[in-house]
Amino acid sequence: MKYKLDLTDIYNYCIDFNGLSGIESYSSLPWFEKGTSTCKMQLENVSINMDEAILRDQILSVNPKSIINISDDLIILAQKALLTIENVCCYDLKVIHNERDYYYSSGLKFNIKDRYIDFGGNDTEHLYSNIYGSAIFKGKVFLELEEDKIVPLMIGCDDQIGGYEVIKKINYNKELEVKMKNKPLDISIFNNIESPIWDFDFYMKHFTSHDDYKEAILDYPPSQNNR
């Protein structure tokens, strides 16, 4: 069974792109649906906090027998998921591949109240690659999951998968999977423009973090009225 979850107001809290659980998260390079401003990326081995009622209800209203119904303090491991960001104004990438940095910027521009999301992880297809990305958008954020790709990870502070040795095995097996793919990275996709979004002081000046999402507090470039 498939679920399409609206994360627009809770994405910052729900998705663990940093692998805090110990399981290394993976992401594909983002792509855009042809002729649209809708950005998508495949996520693998990503931890998701399921203790928000607004998130749990979206699954349980469709499938009361879902595995997430074991606790309201659950963190799951999504072995595969699809992240969709609608109405993207601009996006930026920093990819570290074979210890070299590659940048892409679509051109940084945003207005007050536009939303900001960062994403990334180990590359799903290219060995020795790490993806760091951000998108600024005016639309919604969706996460698509499949019931048979969900594994209970933690309930509160209690491990559900078998401890550190199992986590090591999951990480090892995923790395082997990427080694078997090991597609060559097309360097030509990068325009080598390093956006100011990567500067921490710039980010702190232009954005604020709410509990569950991030949004712009200034226009960029500054509007004529703010100069």
Image (spheres, rainbow, N blue to C red):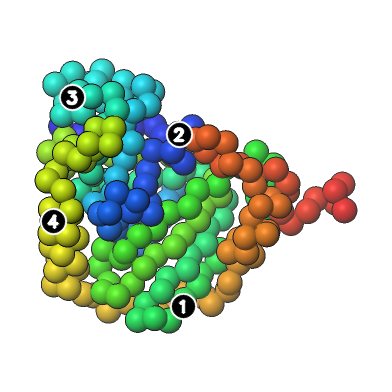
Of badges 4 and 1, nearer the viewer stands 4
Give the residue displayed 15% in from the left and 64% down from the top: 172
Give the amino acid at mark 1.
Answer: Asp
Pinpoint residue 23: horizontal percent, then vertical percent. 25, 54
Q: Is residue 35 left or right of residue 69?
A: right
Q: Are marks 3 and 1 in contact (CB under 8 Å)?
A: no
Disc assigned to residue 101: 1
Q: Are marks 2 and 4 in contact (CB under 8 Å)?
A: no
Disc assigned to residue 165: 4
Q: Who comes first in sequence, dot 4 or dot 1? A: 1
Q: Are marks 3 and 2 in contact (CB under 8 Å)?
A: no
Residue located beneath label 3 in the image: 70
Q: Are marks 4 and 1 in contact (CB under 8 Å)?
A: no
Element carrying mark 3: helix
Q: Vertical placement of 165 versus 7: above or below?
A: below
Pinpoint residue 104: horizontal percent, then vertical percent. 51, 69
Of badges 3 and 1, nearer the viewer stands 3
Element carrying mark 2: loop
Q: Quadrant of residue 199?
A: bottom right
